[in-house]
Image (cartoon, rainbow, N blue to C red):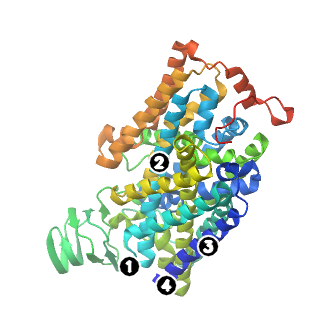
Amino acid sequence: MSSAYGVAAVLLVVMATVLIGAFGIRLSRTTSDFYVASRTVSPLWNASAIGGEYLSGASFLGIAGLILAYGADMLWLPVGWTGGYLVLLVLVSAPLRRSGAYTLPDFAEARLESMAVRRTASVLVVLIGWLYLMPQFQSAGLVLRGVTGAPVWAGGVLVAVVVAVNVLSGGMRSITFVQAFQYWLKLTALALPLMFALFAWHADGRPDIVRDGLPVFAEKTTVTFATDVTIEVEQTVWVSVSGTLDGRAANGPVTLTEGAHRVRHDATMTFPAGTAVPHVDNLPALTDHEWALPLQGRDHPVYATYSLILATFLGTMGLPHVLVRFYTNPDGRAARRTTLVVLSLLGAFYLLPAVYGALGRLYTPELLMTGRTDAVVLTLPGRLIGGTLGELLTALVAAGAFAAFLSTSSGLTVSVAGVIGQDILGGGVRAFRVATVLAVIAPLALAMVARALAVADVVGLAFAVAASSFCPLLVLGIWWRRLTTVGAMAGLLAGGGLAGVAVAATIIGGPYGGWWGALLAQPAAWTVPISFIVMIVVSLATPRKVPPGVARTMVRLHTPETLKVDRGNWHPRSA
């Protein structure tokens, strides 16, 4: 793709983000404006903003890449990420809005009347937010390098600066306008190029996606390696190599025998048409028939699939940047209407990435060899359409990808800064602005030093932590009056702590093989039950620790606003 088109696309998104955010400055004056937009956001605006911040780089790029590599199993990701809002609608959305809180720690303090539980919730909010932000910055760097040739660190810094400026300027009200615009930009950036790609596929004779054997290069293909990789060759093949292969410099024809081969960055390989595509060593070698079937390509696939389902369905309600949106609705009824609209918007969006992944199996199989499967959405329009139109469509996709990074990062920054500003810096607009800088610096630094993983994998780990900590707290806190302070604290520490250990082990030392690898890479199946069990058992064992004001709190959570029942004397500390 022309770097000029890429630069122009990214700059247009950045300028639009800043200008729309600047509009919110005129309307943001009070603390309530900065934290929850004074609770005056309509359901359609709020739903569009939720779609904007929820559809991160994992949704825009990661799902298509995982479907390209792993096949049908990964369809559970869009199903779970959408279904999580249905669980949220049924169990959480309206009571959470009626709580009157600004943040998750506010809710924890109101329900359990404990500063210790509030502080624990604050730590978890910050950790989940940073874990979610880190891959956004990393992926932004890879995308910007791919479309403009800029250094990897530049994309993350650009996203961090733009997000910080917007959040510092207008808080939640400003971000609401920005994220609503970015949802519709992301939908257009996927839908329009996909329409042209499907026309090109039809003109190509509609070749079958599922064929016999491994994916093959349909024509003579040159592959460039941006990083050091180890590839697994399934069938011996003659290739032309320029660069370092297996520790030796090569410049000409080479025989790639079956087995593993080490390729240095900046090397190129040219494969003849009809050659089976080698795969990077951390991806499975799936035939097309295996790729199209569920429960293939991973260790202990039944466990991994059910754990993924549990994390995605229950993790949504525990994401701080999602929950803070429900505090911006005028009342509980509006919160429910917002959730219904969100389900429609997410369902429309998630129809698209799977098609990119399937077409990528036909037209961009070399991504299985370089390991950059997340790039299939960026690569496919130029490969299928070509010419100026292909470059323009690729630039549009790049703009959508940057919109994904900016919108999700904005929502996460608001939620993390809200917690830091209230619980550490004492509340107020000035504290919120200082907290915003702290909220983006830490994950940006982590993104610079941590090893890069697939964006959807890291986001999936954040979902597992959220499902193991805040999901039990919200469900039991809203629907079980016997939850005690000690029980809630024990469950948060057990579930959140164990999930956090699994995440750290996976990021720092993984991937692991066998049962240990499956348990650590997909921890939700055992950490979520542990958290629920610990909260319930410890609460039953400590009945005297039930908060004295629980009856009033439960009435406030479950009574419709139209009845105008006394909401009690509790208010968020920053109100």
Query: Which of the two labelled residues, at mark 4 and mark 3, occupies the earlier sequence position?
Result: 4
Residue lying at the far right in this picture: please name it: 563
Identify the image quadrant of residue 454.
Answer: bottom left
Q: Give amino acid for label 4.
A: Ala
**Image height check: is 118 above or below 391?**
above
Q: Which mark is residue 460?
A: 2
Q: Secondary structure at mark 2?
A: helix
**Rendered-image quadrant of the C terminus:** top right
Q: Read off the residue under disc 4.
A: 4
**Image height check: is 342 above or below 271?**
above
Q: x and y percent of residue 376 in the render? A: 46, 67
Q: Which mark is residue 195?
A: 3
Q: Residue at x 77, y 53 (%)?
A: 42
Q: Read off the residue under disc 1.
A: 219
Query: Which of the two labelled residues, at mark 1 and mark 3, occupies the earlier sequence position?
Result: 3
Query: Which of the two labelled residues, at mark 2 and mark 3, occupies the earlier sequence position?
Result: 3
**Which mark's residue is nearer the viewer, 1 or 2?**
2
**Which mark's residue is nearer the viewer, 1 or 3?**
3
Would you say 507 lies left or right of 262 here? right
Q: Residue at x 37, y 47 (%)?
A: 298
Q: Residues within 10 Å of mark 2 (few under 14, many from 20)?
A: many
Q: Which mark is residue 290?
A: none
Question: How far, Cα to Cα, is label 4 from label 2?
Answer: 34 Å
